[in-house]
Image (cartoon, rainbow, N blue to C red):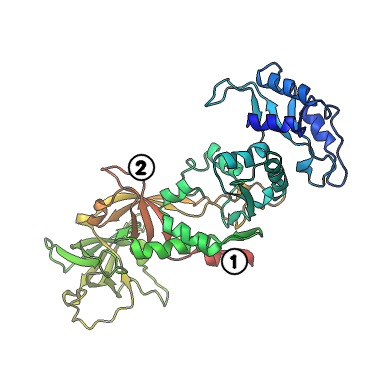
């Protein structure tokens, strides 16, 4: 880079300027008014070379001099008005130590670094479109023709309910709104990976969105759809209860344990079966029971029947409550022995099927229920008096105990699993032999579509 700068000086295309950064900025003019040329613009090549070498050798203090390109102070493109190439900063570099005290500016390094590193196409977001004439000017004046790089601009990918600004994301990290750059709520590759998004899902999403020249904002629901589409085909299934309530099957033998069968992944015709133990006491999800249900509630309620997935049809006989709080402690049911899945001869018609876990065989784990980080579709577009952090979703992370079938112990960190009837999860690196930690990747259905419509109304 230094040698390239020397080449420009020898061609009379660069000069050393003694103006301060403030004076340089003030002399640039406006987009409709030309700038004012530096009084040092016509220094000779020999003087410029001597001053530039002295800059490199540390003979001047910070800010005393800069190297500028000699282009056109009346150009309608402000970036072409004699931009700064090098500035003096006496600071150690993390690789070269104190060898250098002059450092190149971004626009000066861009095209030349691309060429040195054999970059053929430099893909930039739209705000760099006005920088492209300068990118090309440097390459032209350094006579770089063979394997010449090109800058191409495209619209930034923006997603609803999140932000893409690195500055604002850093603010979230520093203020401990999130737990680092790989927090599963962050729109970073490391965050998406930890949340359980697969490379295939992200690639499919990128192909569906495409590349455009117009700024737009993409619905987060599309990314979630691509993730569901991929995981539905690839993720093994397991039954896990997150909000447990105890069910006692009164007429089931006390010491009996049966092994029910369920496909590891019903979407894969080559998948094998898994064994799921069934016993007298089980957990079901609290959301699958209502004492006084509405008309179209087809799960468990007093006097009603429901099928336990892969197992039997049960009927709710009674409910036991805590006398002090009135909270339901356990549900007492009976089962129909002839109604076993795959062998059902009961002729009982049921409209609902719920998941369950045998209490005696349940594996206790931790579920981190991640949701969208912001409540506003476009948190970057803040209203007057508002900060983007004012739109943080207070329920973007809920931590809960959960109980799963024994098969969840066979998975390892990073594996994707579908909790049947609940959503897709992945095993977090925080997991240990004593406690498996599951991160929710995405729910089985898009629960935000309705919220989005309500917000627009």
Q: Please state the horizontal and vertical placement of residue 252, each as a whole percent of the image.
A: 16, 67
Q: Please state the horizontal and vertical placement of residue 316, each as a whole percent of the image.
A: 27, 71
Which quadrant of the figure contains the N terminus? top right
Q: Residue at x 66, y 33 (%)?
A: 4
Q: Which mark is residue 430?
A: 2
Local packing at callout 2 (Cα closer than 10 Å; few below 14, some 14-19, many 20+) is: few
* Above or below for 12 versus 181: above
Which residue is more in the foreground, 47 or 236? 47
Q: Residue at x 64, y 21 (%)?
A: 90
Q: Which mark is residue 454?
A: 1
Number of numbered markers: 2
Q: Earlier in the sequence, mark 2 or mark 1?
A: 2
Q: Please state the horizontal and vertical placement of residue 121, each as a whole percent of the image.
A: 58, 50
Which residue is more in the foreground, 229 or 123? 123
Judging from the image, what secondary structure is the residue with disc 2 in?
loop
Q: Residue at x 69, y 45 (%)?
A: 136
Q: CA distance from mark 2 to mark 1?
A: 37 Å
């Amino acid at each position: 880079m230094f040698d390239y700068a020397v080449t420009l000086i020898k061609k009379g295309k660069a000069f050393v300027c003694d103006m301060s950064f403030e004076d340089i900025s003030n002399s640039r003019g406006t987009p409709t008014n030309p700038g004012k040329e530096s009084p040092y613009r016509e220094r000779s090549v020999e003087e410029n070379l001597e001053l530039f070498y002295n800059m490199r050798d540390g003979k001047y203090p910070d800010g005393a001099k800069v190297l500028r390109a000699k282009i056109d102070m009346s150009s309608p493109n402000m970036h072409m008005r004699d931009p700064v190439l090098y500035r003096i900063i006496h600071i150690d570099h993390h690789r070269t130590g104190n060898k250098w005290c002059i450092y190149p500016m971004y626009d000066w390094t861009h095209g030349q670094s691309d060429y040195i590193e054999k970059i053929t196409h430099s893909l930039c977001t739209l705000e760099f479109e006005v920088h492209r004439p300068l990118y090309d000017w440097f390459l032209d004046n350094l006579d770089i023709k063979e394997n010449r790089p090109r800058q191409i601009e495209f619209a930034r990918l923006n997603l609803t309910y999140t932000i893409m600004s690195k500055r604002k994301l850093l603010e979230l990290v520093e203020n401990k709104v999130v737990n680092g750059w790989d927090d599963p709520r962050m729109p970073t590759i490391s965050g998406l990976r930890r949340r359980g998004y697969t490379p295939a899902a992200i690639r499919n999403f990128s192909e569906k969105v495409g590349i455009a020249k117009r700024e737009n904002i993409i619905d987060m629901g599309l990314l979630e759809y691509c993730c569901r589409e991929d995981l539905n085909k690839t993720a093994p299934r397991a039954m896990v209860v997150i909000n447990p309530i105890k069910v006692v099957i009164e007429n089931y033998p006390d010491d009996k344990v049966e092994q029910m069968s369920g496909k590891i992944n019903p979407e894969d015709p080559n998948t094998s079966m898994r064994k799921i133990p069934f016993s007298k006491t089980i957990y079901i999800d609290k959301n699958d029971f209502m004492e006084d249900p509405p008309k179209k509630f087809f799960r468990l309620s007093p006097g009603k029947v429901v099928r336990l997935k892969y197992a039997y049809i049960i009927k709710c006989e009674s409910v036991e409550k805590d006398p002090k709080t009135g909270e339901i402690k356990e549900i007492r049911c009976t089962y129909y022995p002839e109604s076993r899945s795959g062998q059902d001869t009961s002729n009982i018609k049921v409209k609902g099927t719920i998941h369950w876990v045998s209490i005696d065989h349940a594996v206790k784990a931790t579920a981190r229920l991640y949701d969208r980080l912001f409540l506003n579709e476009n948190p970057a577009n803040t209203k007057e008096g508002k900060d983007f952090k004012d739109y943080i979703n207070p329920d973007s992370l809920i931590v809960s105990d959960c109980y799963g079938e024994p098969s969840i112990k066979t998975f390892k960190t990073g594996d994707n699993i579908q909790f049947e009837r609940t959503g897709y999860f992945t095993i977090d690196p925080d997991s240990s032999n004593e406690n498996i930690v599951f991160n929710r990747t995405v729910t089985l259905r898009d629960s935000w579509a309705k919220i989005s419509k309500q917000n627009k109304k």
